[in-house]
C-alpha cells in the first residue's frame, strides 16, 4: 500500500469509527454469516421470550431481570440484518430469496424491529409491568411480520 492509499484507509477507518453505524462483523465464509445471524436471533429469542412470559403472567415479574433481557434484545436486534450480504443465501438456511430481491423492504422491517425493541427497553427502564406489556406486543409483531414474509420453514 502506498502512503496515499494508507492515508485514505486510515481516514476511512476514522470516519467509520465516528459514524453511529451498527456493529457489523466481517465474514470469511458465507456459512459464518448464516451462523452469525441465526445465532444472534437464537440468543435474542431466549431473552425476548422471558420478557414475554413475564408480560403474560407465566413467570413472576422481576424488573431487574426484565431490564437485563430488554438490554440484550435491543442490542442484538441490530446484528442479524448485517449478515445478509450477497452470496449468503445457502440451501441450508431459512432465509427466503426475497430478502435479496426486496432488500429495501427487508431493511425497513428490520428498522421496525430496532425501533420497537428500543421502546421495549425504554419501558423496561420504567420497571412498570404495564408499560412493558404495552411495548411487548408491537415488538413481537415485528418478528411475526418479517418471519411471515422472509423466513422459510
Ligand atoms: C427483518 C426481518 C426479521 C425480523 C424483524 C425478525 N426476524 Fe427472526 N429471522 C428472520 C430470518 C430471515 C430468519 C432466518 C435466518 C436464516 O436462517 O438465515 C430468522 C430466524 C429467527 C430464528 C431462528 C434462529 C435459528 O436458530 O436458526 C429465531 C429464534 C428468530 N428469528 C427470532 C426472532 C424474534 C424473537 C424476533 C423479534 C423480536 C425476530 N426474529 C425478528 C427475520 C427476521
Image (cartoon, rainbow, N blue to C red):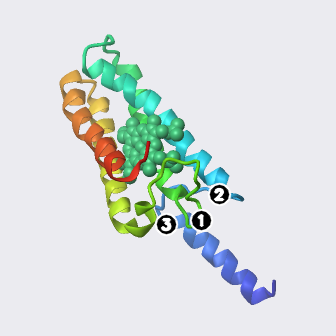
**Label 1 within 8 A of ligand 1 by Cβ:** no
On the image, which quarter does residue 97 sit in? bottom left
- The residue that appears at 56% across and 67% down in the rendered structure is 86
From mark 3 to mark 2, how far is it between C-alphas? 26 Å
Give the residue number, with chain letter if any, for mark 3: 19
Q: Quadrant of the N terminus?
A: bottom right
> N-terminal of the two: label 3 or label 2?
3
- The residue that appears at 54% across and 43% down in the rendered structure is 38
On the image, which quarter does residue 122 sit in? top left
- The residue that appears at 32% across and 63% down in the rendered structure is 105
Q: Is residue 75 visible?
A: no
Give the residue number, with chain letter if any, for mark 2: 30
x, y percent for residue 57: 25, 14
Q: Out of 39 and 23, give the one closest to the viewer.
A: 39
Give the residue number, with chain letter if any, for mark 1: 87
Q: Nearer the viewer, mark 3 or mark 2?
A: 2
**Label 3 within 8 A of ligand 1 by Cβ:** no
Disc sitting over residue 1 in the figure: none
Q: Quadrant of the C terminus?
A: top left
x, y percent for residue 76: 47, 43
- The residue that appears at 33% across and 12% down in the rendered structure is 59
- Helix, strand or loop at label 2? It is helix
Measured along the vertical axis of the image, is residue 69 above or below residue 59?
below
Cβ atoms at labels 2 and 1 below 8 Å apart: yes
x, y percent for residue 46: 46, 28
Measured along the vertical axis of the image, is residue 59 above or below residue 36?
above
> N-terminal of the two: label 2 or label 1?
2
Amino acid at each position: 500500500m502506498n502512503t496515499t492509499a494508507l492515508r485514505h484507509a486510515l481516514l476511512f477507518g476514522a470516519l467509520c469509527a465516528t459514524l453511529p453505524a451498527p456493529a457489523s462483523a466481517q465474514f470469511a465464509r458465507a456459512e459464518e454469516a448464516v451462523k452469525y445471524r441465526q445465532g444472534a436471533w437464537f440468543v435474542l429469542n431466549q431473552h425476548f421470550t422471558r420478557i414475554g412470559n413475564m408480560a403474560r403472567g407465566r413467570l413472576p415479574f422481576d424488573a431487574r431481570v426484565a431490564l437485563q433481557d430488554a438490554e440484550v434484545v435491543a442490542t442484538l436486534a441490530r446484528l442479524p440484518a448485517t449478515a445478509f450480504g450477497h452470496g449468503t443465501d445457502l440451501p441450508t438456511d431459512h432465509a427466503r430469496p426475497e430478502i435479496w430481491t426486496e432488500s429495501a423492504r427487508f431493511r425497513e422491517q428490520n428498522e421496525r424491529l430496532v425501533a420497537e425493541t428500543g421502546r421495549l427497553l425504554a419501558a423496561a427502564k420504567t420497571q412498570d409491568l404495564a408499560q412493558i406489556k404495552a411495548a411487548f406486543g408491537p415488538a413481537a409483531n415485528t418478528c411475526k411480520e418479517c418471519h411471515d414474509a422472509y423466513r422459510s420453514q
